[in-house]
Structures are given as structure tokens and as C-alpha cells.
Image (spheres, grey):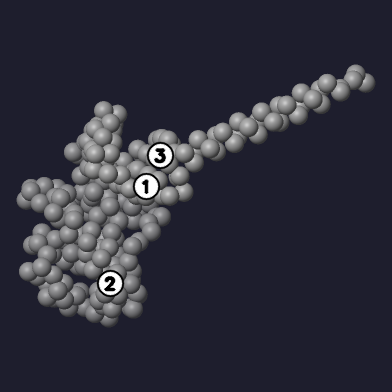
Amino acid sequence: MTDGSSAATAEVEIRDDTLIAVARRYAEALIDTAQKEKQVDAALEELAEIGTDVFPRFPRFAELLASERVPVGERDRILGDVFGGRASDLVLRFLRVLNRRGRLGLLRPIVAEARTNWDRRNHRIPVSVRTAVPLGEDQMQALKDRLAGLVPGTPILSVSTDPSLIGGLVIQVGDHLYDASVKNRLTQLRHRLIEGKMHEIQSRRDQFSYPA
């Protein structure tokens, strides 16, 4: 860490295998501890909010926690003053552990790994859905019911709207993409028309081909 850096609370783009392994270890420890206290979902929600909302909204606070000029004990006191009585005891303890070990910069990756870990343990399958227009309640429920019979677990939907799809939807489950959008159908139709036209042109050329 460097003084004045927001690395302690900014989203970290992890590319180093060592950092990925570190984030996973902390994530697993968090899940194991939170599970014993039956607070996993609540703890993950709190930590996610701190990482994605609180720290970005207060960059000077983030810089303070990142500064090597501020002793670890002082940063620990600040965490207690700010989050004591506001965050759960479990969340505050975890933040203090990260602070003492210089890992606050990995908060968001750790939470992301923890969420993946917890979903896997509970056979929850993240499903990304893009729709051309917002889905109504009945449509959303019908989609959930349909996916429940297709994925090997409980589908956890993340739904967004993408008007460029024109109509229909795009579903992604892991590495599998199911594109049922009007945009995709039009693209496929265009390719078929181009291929047909090229075949027609080639056929006409063949009619005027003579042996050498």
C-alpha cells in the first residue's frame, strides 16, 4: 500500500494467482465463521454494501484506511468508531482482521469469492439474464420456473435490460449462452441471406466456366 492510495477500498482487479488464492482463503474463512454463527447471507450483504457503496462514496475515508502513515492500531480504532453499532459484530471483526493483515484492498474480491463459495455449497446457480424490455412479475416467475427445470440447482437470477436485443432474451449459465433474442435471429437471417446470395453468384459463375 502507498500513502494516499485508495487501494484499500477500491475494487481490485486481481490478475496475480497469489492474490486470487489469498482472496479465496479469506473468503472460505469468512464463510466458515459466518456459517457457525448462522449469519452468512447477512454478512455477505453487509460487506458487499461496504465495498461497493460506503467506501466509494467516502474516498477520503478510503485513503485514510489505505495510508501506511496511519498506524494499524489507529486504523482499527477508526473502523470501530465508524462501524461499531452500525455493522454486525461479525462484519466488524472481519474488517479488523483484514486491516491488521493489510488485506482491506481485497475486500470486494473476497466478498465475490465468498458469494461464489456460498452459492456452490447451497447448490445455487448464478444465471445472468438480459431482456429487451423489463419483465413483469408473471414473466419473471415463469422464467424462474423454467430455469429450475434446466439447471442442476436453484437458479439465482441477475436480470438486466438491453434494448439493443429488440425482443426476446439472452441467458447465460456459466460458460453456456442461450441467445433467444430478436437481434440474434436477425443476425442469423442476414448471414443465411448472404450465404445464399454468394452461392447464387458462384452458381452463375460456374455456368460460364469453360475447360482450359
Whether residue 104 is visible here, answered yes or no, is no
Please indicate whether residue 192 sits to the left or right of residue 2 in the image.
Answer: right
Residue at screen point 34% across, 56% down: 19
* Residue type pointed to by label 3: Gly
Q: Quadrant of residue 192?
A: top right
Residues at marks 3 and 2, CA–CA distance in whole angstroms: 36 Å
Q: Quadrant of the N terminus?
A: bottom left
Of circles 2 and 1, which is in front? 1
In this rendered view, identify the residue nearer to me: 31 or 138: 138
Q: Out of 61 and 4, give the one closest to the viewer.
A: 61
Circle 3 is placed at which residue position? 168
Quarter of the figure with residue 201: top right
> Residue at the location (93% across, 21% down)?
212
Give the secondary structure at mark 2.
helix
Please identify, in this view, whether the residue under mark 3 or under mark 2 is nearer the observer.
Answer: 3
In percent of width and height, residue 177 lies at 41, 37
Q: Which amino acid, by three-letter code, is at mark 1? A: Val
